[in-house]
Amino acid sequence: DAKTTQPPSMDCAEGRAANLPCNHSTISGNEYVYWYRQIHSQGPQYIIHGLKNNETNEMASLIITEDRKSSTLILPHATLRDTAVYYCIVRPPYQTGANNLFFGTGTRLTVIP
Amino acid sequence: NAGVTQTPKFRVLKTGQSMTLLCAQDMNHEYMYWYRQDPGMGLRLIHYSVGEGTTAKGEVPDGYNVSRLKKQNFLLGLESAAPSQTSVYFCASGLFVGSYEQYFGPGTRLTVT
């Protein structure tokens, strides 16, 4: 499985866009990039995933570089409720059996009023 | 649409006692998972189920049993609790085989004394 590297912490002003980077230089051609977050004392929350094209949903946008070696999660208008640890993980598709999630250390995003 | 719910939210057990954690999902997902999360250890998969009536072992199954009698419910049992089982337990569900898009419950905080 490809490893990921994320900055340990970031701050973002409330109302501004939060751009969270992730490096996954050893990603294989069929591996997807997934983003999760975990707000303090809550369960992990799925945000978005993608393969090579940029993706957008109601929560965030995912920008994947053309060489797929890095990606950026964008929260367009950060609020205080977005303060959480954000995890970028890389996984191959269609593994049978346990689709186990291994979270690394992630990025602790603090949204500042 | 409640998503994934877990009961109880908190529990304190004495060593040797037993209990059952209940997970319920209303999203008609085939896959369900039980994880534990300990400080500095990330998520570890205990058991999972790929459909009603089926269960399988994950990464750390010892000391736990599970049952999936109904598609919407996944039960985690501790037959004889040990202090090493003090943890936060998360249930998750997923729709597609091979997808790492999982939806988590709020967690059960268990302390074994």
Image: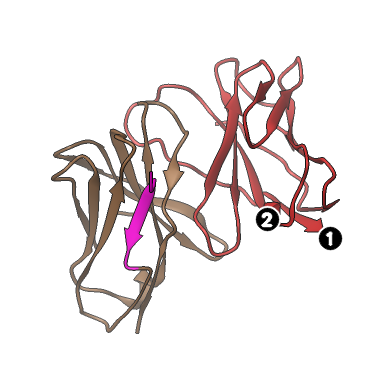
Regarding residue B62, the answer to whether it shows in the image is no
The Cα atoms of the two marked residues, 2 and 1, are separated by 11 Å
Depth order, front residue of B30/B65: B30
* Chain of the residue under label 1: A
Q: How many marks?
A: 2
Q: Is residue B42 left or right of residue B50?
A: right
Which residue appears at 57% of the width and 62% of the height? B40
**Would you say residue B7 sits in the magenta stretch?**
yes
- State the image quarter where residue B79 is shown: bottom left
Chain shown brown: that is B
**Part of the protein shown in magenta:** B1-8
Which residue appears at 32% of the width and 32% of the height? A97
Decide: few, some or many residues near mark 1? Use Cα within 10 Å; few <14, some 14-19, many ≥20.
few
Image coordinates of residue A62 in percent, x first then y, are: 69, 28
Depth order, front residue of B92/A1: B92
Residue tagged by mark 2? A81
Residue tagged by mark 1? A113
